[in-house]
Structure formats: C-alpha cells, structure tokens
Image (cartoon, coloured by chain):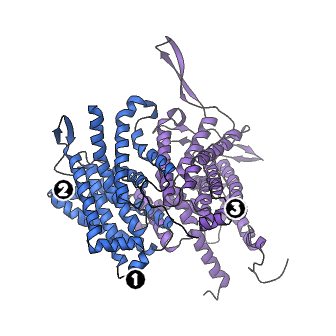
C-alpha cells in the first residue's frame, strides 16, 4: 500500500513535468494550428540556458532562471519569425514536418552546448526530501507540481481576463476574422511561441532537477506528445488530464512491471505513454477532450 | 510518327505515359547506362573531367539503390495518399529482422538445467537458413502484415493525430527490437545479415558471371539496380492506375474523395500495406551492404531521414524519391568532401574535435534542408529539375 501511494506521488510529479511541456504544445496548436515537433529542442535549449548561467557563469539560480526565461522566449520568437512565418497558409503537414527539421537542427546546437556529461541545473532543491505522513517526497517533486499548477493557472487567467489573452483566443477561433477586428495575428503567433518555449524550458528545468540534464531529456519532451494526443490537441484542460493519466500509468508500470510482467523487458515504462495513446485513440480518435472536426465539402 | 507541336498533350494516355516523349526515353536510358557503368567501376569521360566512383562512393551508391526502394514506398503513402507516416523505420526494421531470422544462421548454446539435471539447448538467436527466394518476399510480406495491423488505427485518424501515432509506433517497435534479443541479437550487438544466396547463386561472394569476374560490390550493385527498376516501375504504374488516382484524390481532399465513391478505409489500408511491403524488402537488403543489423538503428531519426528523402527529392514522384534517397545517402560523403575545402575549414574532421564536427554539420544540414526545401521549393529536387528543364526548353524566350 505504501509502495502504491509512493508510486502515485511520483506519478503526479512526473505528470507535472509532462503538463508543462504539453501545455506548450497546446498553446502553439491552438493559436497557429501547428503541431510543434521542435518542442524537445526548445526544452533542451531552455535547460541549457539555465545550466549555463548557474554553472559556467556562476550566478544565483533565480537570476539565471529569469535570464533563461527571457532567452527562451527570444528563441521562440526567433524561430517563429524566421521559419514559421513564411509557412503561414501552407498545409499543416508541411509545417509539422518542417518543425521536425527545426528540431533536428536546434537539437544539434543544444547538445553541442550541453556536452556529453550530465550537467547539474543548479537549482536549490537538489535531492533534498521532505517526510509527510511516512512518505518521502523529494522537494523538487513538490516544486515541479507547484510550478505546473501556478503557471497553468496564470496562463488560464491570462487567456480569460487580459486583452492579449482575448486576442489570442480570437485568433485561435478564426484568424481572418480576428485580423479584421484589429487583432495583430503576427503578435499572437510570436507570443504563442514565446510562451511555449518558456513552458518547455520549465519542463527542462524539472527534468534535470536533482539528477542533472543530458541528451535523454529530449525523450521526455517526446513523451509529452502522447499526453497532448490523449487529452486532445486543442484543450489545455485535456493536456492536464492527459499528463496525469500518462504520468501515473508510466510510474505504475516502472514500479510493478518488473515484478509481474518481466517478459515485457526492461525500460517498458518508457513506451507505456505510446501504448496508452493507442488505446485512447482507438476509442476516441480526437483524444479525450479534443474538438471533433466538423467538415464541409 | 505523328507530326505536330512538341509537348502538346491531347489525350489521357499520353499524359499518363511513363515517358511522355522519345527524348525522355532516350535520356532515361542514358542515365541507366551511366549508372551501370559507374556502379561496375567504369569511368565516363566528360571531356573536361572523368567521372568514376571509388570503393566508398560505390558503397553509398548501393545503399542509395536499396534506400530508394523504401523511399518510394514512403512516397506512396505520404506523397501520393497524403498520410504522413513517421513509422517507416518500424517497417524497415520488421523487414530487416524477418530476413535475418529466416535467412540467417541460428545460434544455440548448451546450458546446465538445474531442474532436470541435464544439459539443454538454449536458443540465443533464431535462424532458419532459408534461401533468398523465400526470405526476401517474406520480409516484404511480414512488413505488409504489420502495415495491415496498424492500418485500422491509421484510417480512423486524420492529419496530425496520425503523424503522432506513427511516431509512437517507432518507439514501440524500437523497444520490441531491443528487448526481443533472440530475434534481434540485442542492443549494441545485433546480428549478421542473412547470406545473399539465391538458389545457390551468391550475391555476396565474388564469382565468374558470363565470363566476367564480379566482386561482391558489383554483384550487390546489380541486385539493387534490378530491384530498384522493378519496384520503381511497379510504383510508377500503381500511381497511374485506379488505385493511384484514388489515393491522390484522398490526398487532395478525403471528404470529397469519399463523396465520389472512394472507400477511404480500404484505400488507406492499401496504401499502408504497399508502402510497408516496399519498406520491408528494402529493410531486408539495405543492411546486407554493411553486413550487420542492429536493433537500435530503427529509431525516429531513421524515419525522419526517409521523410527528408521524399521532401528533398520530390513529393509523390518516383524519380524524386530516388533523387532524395541519393542525396541523403551521399550527404556524409558530401559533408566530408566539403570539410576538405579551405572555405569550410571550420569543420573539424576528427570525431572528438570541437564543434562543429562533420557529424554535427551533417545533422544541421539535414534539418536545414528540410526547412529550406519546404519554404522555398516544396516540389523538391524534382521541382528544381522541372524548372531548369522548362527554362532550356523555352530558351531563348525563357520568361
């Protein structure tokens, strides 16, 4: 029983990381109809900025975090301006495949910056833990959960009450109509990429928290893809639910599969997100909360 | 021959003919002969220079021939039918390991069994040592079967959901190949590819053929060349047939296609199955060039490579897929040659050297080419070729 609850706690904190990355996918998809396969590279780059400023430059983690937020946002805007803007109006596949190309390119730069060793993030939590009712919870897990909840709530508030948030919702609803109402769709696109890159960066920080970051972090970002698919590509709430389902399914598998189904092989938990995705899609082809497409000939 | 305006097409048969004119037929033949001459180690004098391939370039040429078969397969499903598949690496893997199991050598070892107190045989690697006549089609069929199993998920989904699902397929497949070590040989070890023995004729050993001594490379080249011709022609004819027309209709607007009586799920399944068959056959052969097949090579990057091939080469064309396969396969060689020029002196050629190494440049080019081609030339190398051709066709009035 203790083991089960401990597993669930780990699952929720893993879900927090997935949620951060997944929300990044959803923001871009909602406002620009692009599935951004470059998210893993943005995650690596974001984590690279943080670790660069804390370990190489040697400044305070919080200051580094603020600089990294600015740099990640700038990266996002730069990518949108140079590569995505010329593709506006092209088929969604072409754009999606182009982000794969972008990902390949950016990952090379990020990995060259990171090197081949594990790089510490330099965050204050390290491997410290707190004990709560007999359960050991790492501080970084709590931090990840709090960050995910705070950032996502802030995002929802921003969408609902701010002028720019309203503009983004309008652009997501219909770009042309929004344009005629005086919404700067270009600014909306740039802001979506900036926001998404910052969310990916936070995901990267928590992937690397305590243990350090290396090239395998990109795999986590890729596992956020099943998360958004399970939740539905255009739903932030769906992304959160998807993150919980996938996070918990993955940790449950990594805890119990060696015990009960060892024939599935080591590292089976790593592919569980994809299996969950297959099952969900067989039942609901647009994910749990995705909008069903209404089509006219 | 009927006289008239050159290039005037007035009936459907001419429009869909493989060669629209005798000029096209002539240059295609020239290209074929040139490829055979180069592949067999000959040289072509071009006046100002002599074109020939060294051993390494021939190796890349042979790899191109096999990779092109898989690229044509991907082009059928992604280019012609418009279903983006990131799962091509999985089907290549299924073909590769099916071939290795059916045609390869098995391996067993004797271990002491505590329960019975006797030595028992433990299988380390499955292998049936069958003839190429069996394992080559079987590799294609097995991959096609995998495609058939995936298809029901695929045809329910549209657009980006399909892309992500096929991406998931690669991860599941990679896990399967890694862990099922009696089939794949295990991570980092792999297993030897099956011997290329067709009814006793060995493609992978030098021998005398029609009075000519052919070494392993030349025979592999001829095998790949003939197979690519067969598969290329099959794909070309498929595109010109009822199935091809249905698939293009689905690509252009699936809802409209279904209104016209095209059974979407049936044709999408057909596209997946045929494409997987191509991938399976290619996967069975492509690794015989190196001689070893590794389970971890069938990852997402391999799928992206094939996507890049058809994008850079030209979507929905056979010749485009072949051009793209050649371009991507020769990319390492191109980058290494580039690094030799003083202009590109910043590229370090030793693997441990500083950023950027040859491998870095290769991957960056890879991504950059996908991006650049999508923005500036969505029709790929094929489109560039058409533009150049039309320029000279209308010269000196090329505007």
* Mark 2 Cα shell of 10 Å, populated few (<14), some (14-19), many (≥20): many
Q: Residue furthest top?
A: B117
Q: Residue at x 38, y 51 (%)?
A: A242
Distance between the alpha carbons at the discs numbered 3 and 2:
57 Å
Image height check: is A197 above or below B293? below
Dot 1 crowding, Cα within 10 Å, few <14, some 14–19, many 20+: few
Q: Nearer the viewer, mark 1 or mark 3?
A: 1
> How far apart, in angstroms, are the residues tagged by discs 1 and 2?
46 Å
Residue B245 place in picture, x, y as percent? 69, 65
Q: Position of residue B191 (x, y in %)?
A: 53, 37
Residue at mark 3 shares a chain with residue at mark 2: no
Please state if A224 lies on the left or on the right of A66 as rendered: right
Residue displayed at 70% across by 39% down: B134
Give the chain letter at badge 1.
Answer: A
- Who is closer to the viewer here, B194 or A33? A33
* In the image, residue A187 above or below residue B198: below
The answer to whether residue A221 of the structure is visible from this angle is yes
Chain A drawn in what color?
blue
How many numbered callouts? 3
Find disc 2 in the rendering and name its residue.
Answer: A54
Q: Which mark is residue B236?
A: 3
Tell me residue A250's x, y (percent): 37, 42
The secondary structure type at the circle numbered 3 is helix
Instruction: Give residue A40's position: percent from left, percent from top.
Output: 37, 56
User: Dot 1 corresponds to which residue?
Assistant: A180
For marks 1 and 2, give the one nearer the viewer: 1
Chain assignment, label 2: A
Q: Provide the secondary structure element on which disc 2 rests.
A: helix
- Dot 3 falls on which chain? B
Q: Are marks 1 and 3 in contact (CB under 8 Å)?
A: no
Contact between marks 3 and 2 (CB within 8 A): the answer is no
Whether labels 1 and 2 belong to a single chain: the reply is: yes
């Amino acid at each position: 029983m203790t083991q089960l609850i401990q597993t669930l706690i780990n699952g929720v904190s893993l879900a927090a990381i997935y949620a951060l990355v997944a929300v990044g996918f959803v923001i871009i998809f909602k406002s620009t109809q692009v599935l951004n396969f470059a998210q893993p590279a943005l995650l690596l780059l974001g984590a690279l900025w943080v670790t660069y400023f804390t370990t190489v430059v040697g400044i305070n983690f919080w200051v580094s975090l603020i600089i990294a937020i600015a740099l990640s946002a700038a990266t996002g805007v730069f990518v949108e301006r140079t590569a995505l803007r010329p593709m506006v109006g092209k088929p969604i596949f072409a754009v999606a495949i182009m982000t794969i190309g972008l990902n390949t390119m950016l990952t090379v730069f990020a990995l060259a910056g990171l090197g081949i060793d594990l790089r510490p993030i330099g965050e204050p939590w390290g491997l410290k833990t707190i004990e709560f009712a007999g359960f050991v919870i790492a501080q970084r897990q709590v931090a990840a959960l709090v960050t995910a909840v705070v950032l996502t709530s802030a995002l929802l508030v921003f969408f609902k009450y701010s002028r720019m948030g309203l503009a983004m919702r309008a652009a997501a609803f219909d770009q042309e109509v929004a344009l005629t109402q005086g919404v700067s769709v270009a600014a909306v696109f740039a802001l979506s990429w900036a926001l998404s890159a910052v969310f990916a960066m936070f995901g990267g920080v928590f992937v690397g928290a305590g243990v350090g970051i290396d090239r395998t972090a990109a795999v986590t970002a890729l596992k956020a893809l099943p998360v958004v698919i399970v939740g539905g590509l255009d739903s932030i709430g769906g992304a959160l639910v998807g993150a919980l389902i996938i996070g918990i399914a993955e940790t449950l598998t990594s805890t119990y599969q060696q015990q009960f189904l060892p024939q599935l092989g080591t590292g089976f938990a790593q592919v569980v997100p994809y299996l969950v995705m297959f099952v969900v899609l067989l039942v609901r082809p647009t994910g749990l909360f995705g909008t069903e497409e209404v089509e006219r000939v | 021959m009927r006289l008239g305006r050159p290039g005037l097409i007035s009936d459907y048969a001419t429009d869909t003919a493989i060669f629209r004119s005798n000029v096209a037929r002539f240059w295609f033949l020239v290209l074929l002969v040139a490829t055979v001459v180069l592949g067999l180690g000959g040289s072509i004098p071009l006046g100002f220079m002599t074109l020939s391939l060294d051993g390494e370039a021939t190796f890349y040429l042979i790899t191109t021939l096999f990779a092109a078969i898989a690229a044509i397969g991907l082009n059928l499903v992604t280019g012609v039918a418009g279903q983006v598949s990131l799962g091509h690496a999985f089907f290549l893997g299924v073909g590769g390991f099916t071939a290795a199991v059916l045609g390869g050598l098995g391996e067993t070892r004797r271990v002491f069994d505590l329960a019975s107190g006797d030595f028992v045989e433990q299988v380390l690697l499955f292998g049936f040592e069958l003839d190429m006549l069996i394992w080559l089609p079987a590799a294609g069929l097995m991959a096609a079967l995998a495609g058939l199993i995936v298809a029901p998920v695929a045809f329910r989904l549209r657009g980006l959901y399909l892309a992500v699902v096929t991406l998931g397929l690669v991860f599941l497949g990679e896990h399967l190949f890694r862990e099922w070590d009696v089939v794949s040989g295990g991570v980092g070890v792999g297993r030897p590819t099956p011997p290329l023995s067709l009814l006793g004729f060995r493609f992978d050993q030098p021998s005398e053929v029609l009075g000519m001594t052919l070494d392993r490379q030349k025979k592999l080249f001829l095998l790949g060349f003939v197979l690519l011709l067969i598969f290329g022609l099959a794909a070309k004819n498929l595109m010109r047939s009822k199935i091809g027309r249905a698939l293009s209709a689905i690509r252009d607007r699936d809802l409209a296609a279904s209104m016209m009586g095209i059974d979407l799920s049936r044709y999408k399944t057909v596209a997946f199955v045929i494409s997987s068959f191509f991938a399976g056959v290619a996967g069975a052969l492509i690794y015989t060039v190196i001689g070893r097949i590794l389970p971890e090579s069938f990852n997402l990057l391999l799928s992206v490579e094939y996507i890049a091939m058809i994008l850079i080469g030209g979507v929905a064309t056979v010749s485009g897929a072949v051009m793209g396969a050649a371009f991507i396969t020769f990319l390492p060689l191109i980058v290494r040659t580039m690094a030799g020029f003083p202009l590109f002196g910043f590229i370090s050629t030793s693997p441990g050297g500083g950023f950027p190494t040859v491998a870095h440049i290769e991957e960056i080019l890879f991504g950059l080419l996908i991006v650049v081609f999508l923005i500036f030339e969505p029709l790929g190398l094929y489109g560039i070729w058409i533009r150049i051709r039309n320029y000279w066709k209308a010269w000196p009035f090329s505007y």
